[in-house]
Image (tube, grey):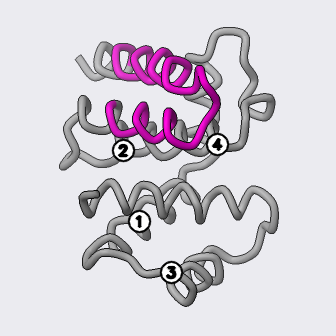
Amino acid sequence: MGVRRQAREIALQVLYQREFDHGEIEEALDLFRNNFEALKGAMDFSERLVKGVEQHREDLDRIIEQYSSHWKVDRMTHVDRTILRIATYELLYCDDIPTKVAINEAIDIGKKYGAEDSGAFINGILDKVKSEERRQAE
C-alpha cells in the first residue's frame, strides 16, 4: 500500500470516529498515532486531509448533497459520506492531486470499506462534482 493510500485510509478512520465522538480533531489524530503504525509521510498527508475536511465540512456537505440525486448527506452511510467528503476536499482544495487520482482512490476505498454498491455510488457523485466544478471554473 502506498503512502497516500494509507493516508486516505487513516483520514477515513479518524473522520469516521469523529462522526460518533465529536471530540477535538487533534485528540482523534493523537488517538490514531498512539495506537497504530503508519508509513513515513502518511500521517502528514492524513492530517492535511482531516483538517481540511473539518475546516470545509459545511461547504463539502452542501456540494455533495447538490450533486447526489435524491440523497441528503445525513442519510448516506457514515463510510460513504466520509469518503465523499475527503475526495471532494481533494478535488476542490488540493491542486497537487490529479482529479482522476482523487476519484479512483475514493472509489477503491469505498469498495474496500463500504457496501457492495459504494464504489458506484461514490463514482457517480464525484463525477458530477468534477464535471460541474470544472465547468464553473471555465
Mark 3 or 1 closer to N-term? 3
Q: What residue is pinned by disc 2?
A: 90
How far separated are the C-alphas under marks 2 and 1? Answer: 12 Å
Between marks 2 and 4, how big is the CA–CA gap?
17 Å
Q: Position of residue 82 (x, y in %)?
A: 60, 45
Q: In the figure, is residue 84 to the left or right of 134?
A: right
Tell whether label 3 touches label 2 (CB within 8 Å): no
Residue 27 covered by magenta stretch: no
Q: At 43% from the left edge and 44% from the top edge, which residue is drawn?
A: 89
- Check disc 3: other Cα within 10 Å, few if <14, some if 14-19, many if 20+: few
Residue at image x 35%, y 22%?
130
Q: Give above or below for 96 relative to 38.
A: above
**In this figure, which residue is indicated by the disc labeled 3?**
36
The image quarter in which residue 132 lies: top left
Residue type for callout 3: Phe
Q: Is residue 92 left or right of residue 118?
A: left
SS of the residue at dot 2?
helix
Packing grade of label 2 (10 A; few <14, some 14-19, many >=20) is many
Callout 2 touching callout 4 (CB < 8 Å) = no
Tell me if residue 46 comes above or below residue 117 in the rendering: below
Q: Which residue is mark 4?
A: 79
* Amino acid carrying mark 4 in the image: Val
Mark 4 to mark 1: distance in Å? 16 Å
Q: Which label's residue is closer to the chain start, 2 or 3?
A: 3
Mark 3 / mark 4, whichever is N-terminal: 3
Q: Quadrant of the C terminus?
A: top left
Label 3 SS = loop
Q: Residue at x 57, y 85 (%)?
A: 35
Q: What's under tag 1, amino acid-wise?
A: Ser
Report the magenta residues as a range: 104-132
